[in-house]
Image: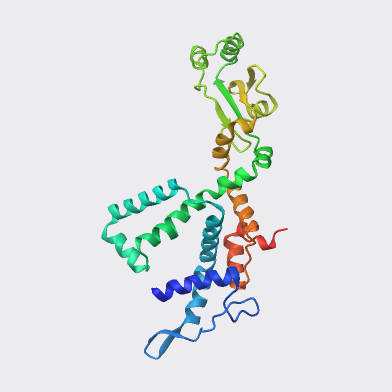
Amino acid sequence: MRNYKKLAGFVGTVALLATLAGCSDAVAKLNDSSEVIFSVGNKTVTKGDVFTLMKQNAGATTVINDANKAIAIAEVEVTDEMKQSAQSSLDSYKSLYGDTFASYLKNNNLDEDTYLNDYLIPSLQAQELTKQYIDENFDSIVDTYKPVKATIITFNSQSDADAALADLKGGNTDFVAVAAAHNATTVPSSTLYTSESTDLDGLARTIITSNSKDEDWTESPSSDGSSYFVIKVDEDDASKMKDEVVTAVQTVKQISADATTYFFKKHNFHIYDKTIYDAVKDQYPDNLVQDMK
């Protein structure tokens, strides 16, 4: 296991930095590849044999995980909250798994401090990268995903929607009571929507993106005509609801992919070994920034 862990580290180092000697024709090699690790009868297994096997089976994952960890450490400051959360996780593992967890650490040549500082805390740092990407690119993300906070009340009949609209325009600010009095099928709540919100009808989306918060309540049928909406834009200035916007767009799959590309470009991630390059291209295309313009 000790040799395995060292070789795992070699794979990441070769692919990221090409610092191991013997790198030719874009294929990294070990200087001591002929060193025998073990033998069975007349069959021997060398470092080179294991290195090649590991590159083929775990090289891409090892490289990407190591790169993510290095970027997270470089980008995200460790906070007291992270330290407390990591310690809580460690204590929980020890309590839940007891000797099994202790054996896991031992078998991987780890002690509790190393596991805490080299694995748990960097994992928490990595979770902050998408949030940091959004913060650093907030204006462009707002332009793309158009966050708007609005209250949308749904009715099955136009007469109920008309009556509710009249009450609301008349100054009744108890939206929940108005909705209940006119047979609404939803309970009104001010909700943040983006262009990626899947629970938003097309016509309702058009209204909340075209209206401003200064405009009064608006009524609209649904796209299929089966229901009616009464709508009010509550906030259309993303800077005034930044925390909510950041939380909302973090769930957008494309944001996560864009964040990955952003940070891997920022840190000039480059793969020199062709075997690992091909594997990363297949498994982690968002990370292969050296081919991106």
Give the x, y percent position of residue 18: 60, 73
Up-down relation of residue 119 to residue 214 (above or below): below
Looking at this view, name the residue that lies furthest to the front.
80
Up-down relation of residue 99 to residue 202 (above or below): below
Give the x, y percent position of residue 252: 58, 43
Identify the residue at image location x=60%, y=44%: 134
Identify the residue at image location x=64%, y=41%: 138
Left or right, residue 237 beside residue 120: right
- Of residue 174 and residue 221, the one placed in the foreground of this image is 174
Name the quadrant containing residue 146.
top right
Identify the residue at image location x=64%, y=53%: 262
Name the quadrant containing residue 167.
top right
Up-down relation of residue 110 to residue 37 (above or below): above
Residue 239 visible, this angle:
yes
Residue 198 visible, this angle:
no
The quadrant of the image that shows the N terminus is bottom left
Looking at this view, name the residue that lies furthest to the left.
99
Name the quadrant containing residue 230.
top right
Give the x, y percent position of residue 229: 60, 21
The quadrant of the image that shows the C terminus is bottom right
Identify the residue at image location x=54%, y=81%: 30
Give the x, y percent position of residue 291: 69, 62
